[in-house]
Amino acid sequence: MREIGGVLPVLTVPFNSDGSIDLDSIPRLIEHCITNKADGVVIFGLASELYKLNDSERLVILKKVIASVNSRVPVIVGTEHSGTQAAVARSVEAEKLGASALMLYPPTFVKPDEANVFSYFKAVGSAVSIPVIIQDAPAWTGVPLPVSLLSRIIKSQPNVNHIKLESPPIGDKAKLLRAVGFQIISGFGGIHLMEELTSGIDGLMPGCSLPGLFVEIHSLFQAGEVRNARTLYELILPLLTFQLTSLDTFIEIQKLLLKQIKIFSTAYCREPHTPISADRIAYLNLLLSEIGLKELEGVKI
């Protein structure tokens, strides 16, 4: 079983201009991540517009991602569902297709109590043999996951042993969860990355448009070059802050950048979607020009 950690970009799903899945862009996106030394990829995270995909589309996309990766890096698959049995079925299917790990946030349509959250992750974990990552994003899900509950889950189901913390600051909670056996992964668009690296995270899940920048920051930090890591982080922080205005904005910027560097054919986002205004696009271009990194040389939206 391959270790899940390091830089794990969350893949956005490419669409054609008519809203259909752009399968031809998926292999290019995978190569973009692997060439930039990502330690794995994540499909069907929040940035994948997973809430706009039907089940048959998810299956087609997952098969394409796994085939394109071709066992070179771990593939982490989001398998959440509002129903426990449906989440179990998705998880079993993903493992059979070649997923290296699963990631789920708790049910959101009917807000579960602690007993239902426990049984949800227990059922998924016991149905598969691969690691399960709990996505702790209460601002999105509306479901708090206290340390006491998470400790019960990992004790009862040891393969539910990773957690993605997306409610900064994460340091105190990460320390408590690490003590009971969890591996810690950060998210939230990388906006608090230096603080999270300092707290000892095992992995991070940034966007997929510029994976090489996150790999470099992570590598510098791991090598003890903390000041250089911080300098690079501070260069891209205005962009990270801008794109995290909303989930819609984050996804669209990933796609705009991927289109400009010829990974995606279009930057189409499925409806419902609120496009970035012309004035904000102009400011985005200003940010990109001021960053001055080779990865963004000549990039203009």
Image (cartoon, rainbow, N blue to C red):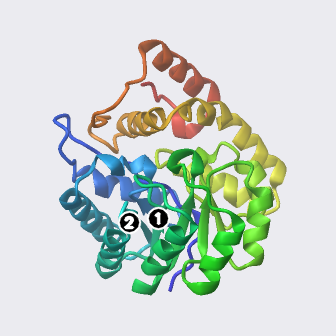
Q: Quadrant of residue 70?
A: bottom left
Percent across and percent down for residue 15 are 25, 43
Percent across and percent down for residue 45 are 44, 55
Which residue is drawn at the image coordinates 26% and 39% (left, top)? 265
Q: Is residue 177 left or right of residue 78?
A: right
Amino acid type at circle 2 is Thr
The number of callouts visible is 2
In the depicted structure, whether residue 39 falls above or below residue 26 = below
Amino acid type at circle 1 is Leu
Q: Nearer the viewer, residue 232 or 238?
A: 238
In the picture, the quarter occupied by the C terminus is top left
Which of marks 2 and 1 precedes in the sequence? 2
Q: Is residue 148 visible?
A: yes
Q: Secondary structure at mark 1?
A: strand
> Tag 2: Cα neighbours inside 10 Å, few (<14), some, or many (≥20)?
many
Q: Are marks 1 and 2 in contact (CB under 8 Å)?
A: yes
Percent across and percent down for residue 1 are 50, 86
Q: Nearer the viewer, residue 298 or 254?
A: 254
Which residue is drawn at the image coordinates 30% and 75% (left, top)? 89
Percent across and percent down for residue 198 are 80, 57
Q: What residue does disc 2 label?
A: 79
> Tag 1: Cα neighbours inside 10 Å, few (<14), some, or many (≥20)?
many
Q: Is residue 265 left or right of residue 165?
A: left
Q: Secondary structure at mark 2?
A: loop
Q: What residue does disc 1 label?
A: 104
Q: Is residue 128 visible?
A: no
In the depicted structure, whether residue 164 falls above or below residue 67 = above
| C-alpha separation, residue under disc 1 versus residue under disc 2 | 6 Å
Q: Nearer the viewer, residue 247 or 143?
A: 143
Which residue is drawn at the image coordinates 58% and 29% (left, top)? 242
Q: Is residue 116 left or right of residue 258?
A: right
Which residue is drawn at the image coordinates 65% and 30% (left, top)? 238
